Amino acid sequence: MSFPSDRHEYEQRDNRTMKLATLKAGGRDGTLVVVSRDLQHCVEVPEIAGTLQSALDNWSTTEPQLKEVYSSLNSGECAGARAFDVEACHSPLPRAYQWADGSAYINHVELVRKARGAELPPSFHTDPLMYQGGSDSFITPRDNVVASKEWGIDFEAEVTVVTDDVPFGATPEQCADKIRLIMLVNDVSLRGLIPGELAKGFGFFQSKPASAFSPVAVTPDELGDAWKDSKVHLPLQVHLNDKLFGKPQAGVDMTFDFSQLVAHVAKTRELCAGSIVGSGTVSNKQGDLFGSSIDNGGVGYCCLAEVRMYETIEQGKPKTAFMDYGDRVKIEMFDADGQSVFGSIENEVVAPS
Amino acid sequence: MSFPSDRHEYEQRDNRTMKLATLKAGGRDGTLVVVSRDLQHCVEVPEIAGTLQSALDNWSTTEPQLKEVYSSLNSGECAGARAFDVEACHSPLPRAYQWADGSAYINHVELVRKARGAELPPSFHTDPLMYQGGSDSFITPRDNVVASKEWGIDFEAEVTVVTDDVPFGATPEQCADKIRLIMLVNDVSLRGLIPGELAKGFGFFQSKPASAFSPVAVTPDELGDAWKDSKVHLPLQVHLNDKLFGKPQAGVDMTFDFSQLVAHVAKTRELCAGSIVGSGTVSNKQGDLFGSSIDNGGVGYCCLAEVRMYETIEQGKPKTAFMDYGDRVKIEMFDADGQSVFGSIENEVVAPS
């Protein structure tokens, strides 16, 4: 992201953009803060909204006020500003009324099917896959993932949006105007529990435990040119135990953009402000094997299941293991200037006590 | 439900029980009211909690205070009491952080399978079916169901519970102690969209639009002897266009009780206070055909899909149609004295505008 050199232009841009976070302190929904563009400072805004959900519930009123605070925070003129500490953050919405996760990168789905010798139904290119996730108690961006390793623990690095109210039957064009914030997510998946659950026919449930979101949520305009056609055109970076594991472009191979994903939700019901809609695991195709690792010169992956499927196609069986206790995943996105946009999600796997 | 004749015993009972509702007025989460046992009077309690979610967030503090109000309301000594108007009610939680719906009446599942000549997997008797429902914007108990009749509109009459916080990995015994409230629900289903969605493997999504809950939520003890072993031992009454359609016993043929259903949710994650967990369509087996209608002397059904499946088994094809525009469903439960416990859910189907 390039910063305008002209002060007037800079201020104009500030008036369209914003970064927000939620501190853990203050109750079940935490405390809303406005965060500076460089993630160095933040300020509480109790006179505007105490929580992010409250801000979203009254967005037409709160948005311009929050953006004024953001502008003054970036120019170093904000009273009450203090150091921004990611460790003190909860997920921007510690609990939400909706978490609907798509699977918009069809390469991810194609890879899964290919590994078991199945073809992709043609409808998968026109009708999005989506599941309803649990949203009552997300973990924080730096929390441990508590799960038994027998369950086949995997991360899934994704991009998500937060919507305003969306009416029943809204078109993709109408939905594009209802996207208020963008976040990243680690959509933790328990691969060992998925086959049994899908065989029952009711979709994922126990196989999708609590997700962790990025510390910071940003308005679409904050991304500048990187937000286009309801997609984020930046690489999503994943490290596993400090080693680069994936850096696919989130704007590439996204079969359904966010306006289409939100419209999929709205087909038979309205959405309430604060609904989170996810992209599914970001995945770039990169050739006939539907992917390639960083070590092989590719862009790598955003989940372990994909490299295991690549291995299955290439070598007949997976060799990469799922996460063990002590394994750590880090998910982050940088703009063109190398600035972390959302702060990082960093989760370590620990055994249930 | 029999009322104790002794005044002291009556007061003791009041101290254990309560009925609550949410008026639409007052914002997105409405306004909490305590409702008298006979559903004739109610009173706002802003000094205790403004909304039901807020009461549930602080249950150990709010519960005894709300029960005192309930006691004074029932004895006619409550200042500020006014007539209780069901038309003014929203669902007790107009939006919730979780709506996880089981399918605990295995007869319902067995009937579906039987109609298509499939056997029931043995695991279905030990491992509950459950899906994650949308919870961001429920309709009110008397709202219209807005849907295209091409989607195959059906009602599903069910019992639900509302939990307190439930820790990760809680046992059924521990979960039984975390059940705070009981409600009814019309879990609207779009049967025509289900086969396509289930074929995609991600479970229900567009086929499950917004649900409507009963106007009143009650504490388990309010049911007296009818709440036993984490089941409600009363008939659930369903009318379709003013004709009795079903009256199955909710305590009969419930393969998994509510403590087991909540424990199923808690296996891989904690639950936040205010989580709603549903029973699935109430269904009694009544013989080899897995059901019988009221006209045939049976207890009838809690959804149209079941009678259609019965017809398929008996006659080779369904003859009962799904809901048309103008069709009305009414769902209610009465205690042994004929008192409506939760008030009635009454929804009419209308076409999208």
Image: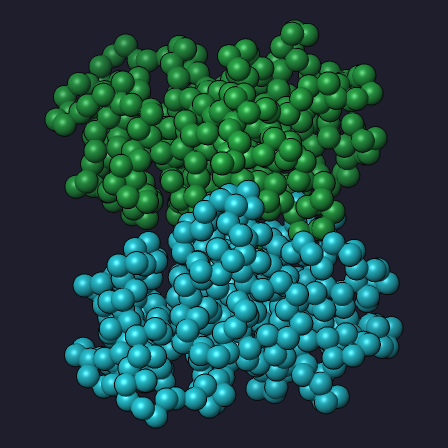
Chain colours: A cyan, B green
Image spot of residue A167 (x, y percent) = 45, 47
Using the rendered view, name the quadrant where residue B325 is placed. Answer: top right
Please name the residue shown 25% across and 40% down the image. B26
Viewer-proximal residue among A331 and A147: A331
| In-image side of A157 versus A32 (left or right) | right
Image spot of residue A214 (x, y percent) = 46, 72
Outermost bottom residue: A5
Using the rendered view, name the quadrant where residue A257 is placed. Answer: bottom right
Image spot of residue A34 (x, y percent) = 30, 73
Viewer-proximal residue among B51 and B353: B353
Using the rendered image of the protein, determine whether residue A15 is visible from the camera's viewpoint.
Answer: yes
Viewer-proximal residue among A166 and B218: A166
In this rendering, the answer to whether A230 lies above or below A268 is: below
Using the rendered view, name the quadrant where residue A349 is placed. Answer: bottom right
| In-image side of A84 versus A351 (left or right) | left
Please name the residue shown 29% across and 23% down the image. B85
| In-image side of B116 versus A225 (left or right) | right
For the N terminus of chain A, give its image quadrant: bottom left
In this rendering, the answer to whether B114 lies above or below A70 is: above
